[in-house]
Image (tube, helix red, strand yellow):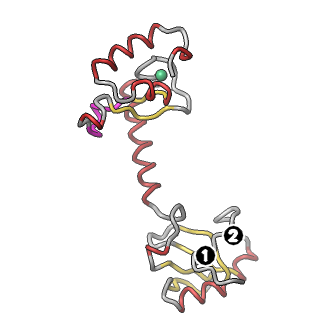
Amino acid sequence: MSTQHTDILCNEPGPAGRVTADAFATSALVFDQEGQPLAPCSAERAASLVQRGRAVLVSRNPLALRLTDLAATPSGIGGSAPTKRRRKKDKRIEQLKRRDGVDCFYCGRPLLDDFTIEHLLSQADGGNDKFANLAIVHQKCNHAAAHLPIVEKVKLRERLRILPTLSGIQ
Ligand SMILES: [Zn+2]
């Protein structure tokens, strides 16, 4: 009812993308600039978006529109950049697992969900994102290594591999 200028995507909390037959009659499908589907909005809102030049009509039946103004997309919704970055990271992790196995580079114990990519030569010291400089490690082990020089990291690795549990490090 109020004219919330930030609400141009009509993204209401709830399962985005679940469009019932009913919804087709009363709402419009919304896509972002890259063609990624967003939460549908009302036909009324769709008309308003098109009138204000914030979206273009791509289909009348079903009613569908595509947003035109990238800057108007609220962060966290529909943007494809985080997804791409995420996909790139997942791929990196798969490659590292193929190279090193599924255990932590530092402590040698199995990696569950709490792992991250470690820069062996830290970025602060000029370490880059190249494959050769990366390893997958527990978050906890990553914190333990922090910005240690690479020689200290090697020593840490030796220490961690003889500790009975991870509880000795923080
Ligand atoms: Zn570990």
Front-most of residues 122 and 14: 122
Which of the two labelled residues, at mark 1 and mark 2, occupies the earlier sequence position?
1
Q: Is residue 61 left or right of residue 155?
A: right
Residue lying at 45% horizontally and 17% vertically, measured from the top left = 107
The mark found on residue 19 in the picture is: 2
Front-most of residues 35 and 146: 146
Instruction: Give x and y (percent) for residue 160.
Output: 45, 13
Secondary element at image label 2? loop
Is 169 drawn above or below residue 63 in the view shown?
above
Q: Quadrant of residue 13?
A: bottom right
Q: Residues within 10 Å of mark 1 (few under 14, many from 20)?
A: few
The mark found on residue 150 in the picture is: none
Q: Amino acid at mark 2?
A: Val
Instruction: Give x and y (percent) for residue 110.
Output: 52, 21
In the orientation shown, which residue stands out farthest toward the bottom? 51
Q: Is residue 162 left or right of residue 124?
A: right
**What residue is shown with label 1?**
7
Instruction: Give x and y (percent) for residue 5.
Output: 58, 80
Q: Amino acid at mark 1?
A: Asp
Instruction: Give x and y (percent) for residue 21.
Output: 73, 74
Report the span colored magenta: 128-135
Mark whose residue sits in front, 1 or 2:
1
Is 96 drawn above or below residue 24 in the view shown?
above
Residue lying at 64% horizontally and 65% vertically, measured from the top left = 17
Q: Is residue 53 left or right of residue 132?
A: right
